[in-house]
Amino acid sequence: LALQDSMLKEHLQPDAECLRVSLTVLWLGGHTAEALGLLRGLDAAEAQVAPQPTKQDPEHPILDLHYQDLSVEVAQLATCAALQDLASGSLPDNGAENFTIIVGRGLHSEGEPV
């Protein structure tokens, strides 16, 4: 996080890959709160670092982990954030049975499943 702070002081915007690496290091280091804060931050949202649950169908939010270059760690973090949002009421609460997380590899997806 110190590196990102110094980048911002020098008017440098971290790109998506820089943010993904930071998220991975924080997650693997057990710094869950910091990783979630960074994931929910404006830079990560703008860079589309990780998928966000769709809110198009309020009755059935979906978290689709078919992102290009999405690491297992960032997928785990995105899932953790979505489940926290569901528990806190940030996502429509129609029961956990209505929330879908797509983790497999689709027929038209490239690469390995996360």
Image (cartoon, rainbow, N blue to C red):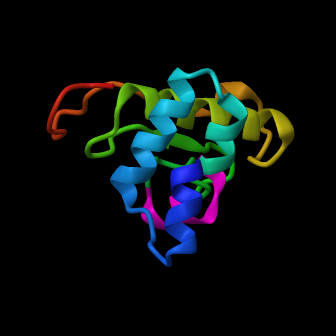
Q: Is residue 14 left or right of residue 82?
A: left
Q: Position of residue 108 (x, y in %)?
A: 16, 40
- At a point 67% along the width and 25% down the height, the residue shown is 97
Magenta stretch, residue numbers: 39-48
Q: Quadrant of residue 9?
A: bottom right
Residue 90 vertical placement versus 30 (above, below) = below
Residue 50 vertical placement versus 114 (above, below) = below
Q: Is residue 66 left or right of residue 82?
A: left
Instruction: Assess whether residue 109 is covered by the magenta stretch.
Output: no
Q: Looking at the picture, tell me which residue is in the foreground, 87 or 43.
A: 43
Tell which residue pokes out farthest to the bottom in this image.
Answer: 11
Q: Is residue 19 visible?
A: yes
Residue 63 vertical placement versus 4 (above, below) = above
Q: Main secondary structure of the magenta part?
A: helix
- At a point 48% along the width and 31% down the height, the residue shown is 25
Q: Position of residue 67 (x, y in %)?
A: 33, 45
Q: Looking at the picture, tell me which residue is in the foreground, 26 or 83.
A: 26
Instruction: Assess whether residue 45 is covered by the magenta stretch.
Output: yes
Q: Quadrant of residue 86?
A: top right
Residue 70 vertical placement versus 80 (above, below) = below
- At a point 15% along the width and 33% down the height, the residue shown is 111
Q: How many marks?
A: 0
Q: Position of residue 3 (x, y in %)?
A: 51, 53
Q: Looking at the picture, tell me which residue is in the foreground, 91 or 15.
A: 15
Q: Position of residue 24 (x, y in %)?
A: 46, 33
- At a point 56% along the width and 22% down the height, the residue shown is 29
Q: Is residue 59 left or right of residue 88?
A: left
Q: Is residue 45 visible?
A: no
Q: Is residue 74 left or right of residue 92?
A: left
Image quadrant in which the C terminus is located: top left
